[in-house]
């Protein structure tokens, strides 16, 4: 296929899109039809999170706009050169390596979906390597800092029940290793809280996490002070106006608390989940058990915490040993 030449800053042109899709019986389709089918597949067929559906939908929309594709047949014939040009254009807009890698993954999945819809014998997307992404080591906070952060958001809140709410959320993240989205998705159906809690994580996969008395007491304190009753279908954690609490509000409360405590910017709500994992591993938890508690699909995702623990031990050694390394 002939490919038009462009500089990396030029938007990809429709010349990358092979013609001939009209013979596959997709006449009358629109851009909106393609995007609706794609996002519906992600949400219901793959059970992706709303955030992923939005991000992958936006990536697909940009590709459709660049190529001018109007049906699955045309889109299915998109090759590696077209994807490379699209990625180059996005990199010129300032995408980092990590974001570019995610963008390429979304593009390849979209093309594979289009090829399946077009009835191609080989639905595999074009082979293309993404940019290398160096995996950073999570930066946990200490057990004392985790508890102090939760206490500080409580003390600093202008409204008592909101402070109790934020404290309960942060203790759930640290005490049970939950993702912030998992904690905020909880409803009144989880009540009354017991020694364990069933959590629905990524891909609608469920796992059981333990709940410490400190965490249960914090949630009970918040519920006793909250101005609304909590029915089984109601969000467990509510915003100031009664709707579901947003992640942004929790992040802002923790940002204020870490400034008060003099902690680094890495002390985010997600760092509390990292702390949960790191501290359990340091106390002797095995990787398989930790994988189950965190809800990781693969053991490889959990193994990064062995590096975190080693890095923590090295920091302790450096700070405590009389001779500088």
Image (cartoon, rainbow, N blue to C red):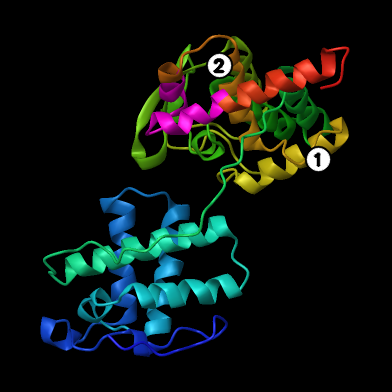
Is residue 173 visible to us here?
A: no
Q: Mark on residue 281?
A: 2
Is residue 123 visible to us here?
A: yes
In whole angstroms, how far apart are the C-alphas of marks 2 and 1? 29 Å
Q: Residue at x 38, y 79 (%)?
A: 64
What secondary structure do most residues of the magenta stretch adopt?
A: helix
Does 202 appear above or below 62?
above
Magenta region: which residues?
Answer: 290-306
Is 235 or 297 nearer to us in this picture?
A: 297
Q: Quadrant of residue 172?
A: top right
* Residue depth check, mark 2 versus mark 1: number of the one nearer the observer: 2
* Picture quarter with the N terminus: bottom left
Is 217 or 279 nearer to us in this picture?
A: 279
Is 301 or 209 nearer to us in this picture?
A: 301
Question: How many C-alpha atoms fall within 10 Å of the one at disc 2: few (<14), some, or many (≥20)?
Answer: some
Q: Residue at x 48, y 33 (%)?
A: 186
Which label's residue is closer to the chain start, 2 or 1? Answer: 1
Judge whether residue 114 is colored magenta: no
Where is residue 78 shown, x and y percent of the image? 30, 76
Where is residue 294 shown, x and y percent of the image? 47, 27
Judge whether residue 300 is colored magenta: yes
Q: Residue at x 34, y 71 (%)?
A: 35
Q: Mark on residue 256?
A: 1
């Amino acid at each position: 296929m002939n490919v038009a030449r462009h500089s990396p800053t030029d938007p990809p042109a429709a010349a990358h899109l092979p013609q001939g899709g009209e013979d596959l019986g997709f006449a009358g389709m629109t851009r909106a039809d393609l995007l609706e089918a794609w996002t519906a597949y992600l949400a219901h067929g793959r059970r992706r999170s709303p955030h992923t559906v939005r991000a992958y939908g936006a990536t697909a929309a940009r590709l459709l706009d660049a190529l001018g594709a109007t049906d699955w047949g045309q889109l299915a014939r998109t090759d590696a050169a077209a994807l490379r040009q699209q990625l180059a254009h996005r990199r010129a807009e300032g995408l980092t390596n990590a974001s570019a890698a995610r963008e390429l993954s979304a593009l390849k999945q979209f093309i594979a979906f289009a090829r399946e819809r077009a009835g191609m014998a080989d639905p595999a997307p074009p082979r293309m390597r993404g940019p290398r992404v160096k995996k950073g080591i999570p930066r946990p906070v200490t057990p004392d800092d985790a508890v102090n952060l939760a206490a500080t958001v409580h003390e600093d809140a202008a409204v008592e029940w909101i402070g109790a709410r934020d404290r309960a959320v942060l203790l759930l993240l640290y005490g049970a290793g939950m993702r912030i989205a998992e904690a905020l998705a909880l409803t009144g159906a989880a009540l009354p809280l017991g020694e364990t809690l069933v959590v629905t994580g990524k891909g609608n996969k469920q796992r059981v996490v333990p709940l410490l008395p400190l965490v249960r007491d914090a949630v009970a304190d918040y519920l006793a002070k909250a101005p609304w009753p909590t029915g089984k279908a109601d969000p467990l954690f509510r915003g100031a106006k009664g709707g579901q609490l947003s992640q942004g509000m929790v992040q802002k409360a923790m940002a204020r608390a870490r400034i008060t405590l003099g902690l680094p910017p890495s002390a985010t709500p997600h760092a509390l989940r990292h702390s949960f994992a790191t501290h359990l591993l340091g106390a002797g938890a095995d990787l398989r058990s930790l994988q189950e508690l965190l809800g990781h699909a693969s053991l490889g995702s959990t193994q990064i915490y062995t590096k975190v623990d080693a890095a923590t031990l090295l920091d302790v050694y450096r700070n405590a040993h009389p001779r500088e390394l």
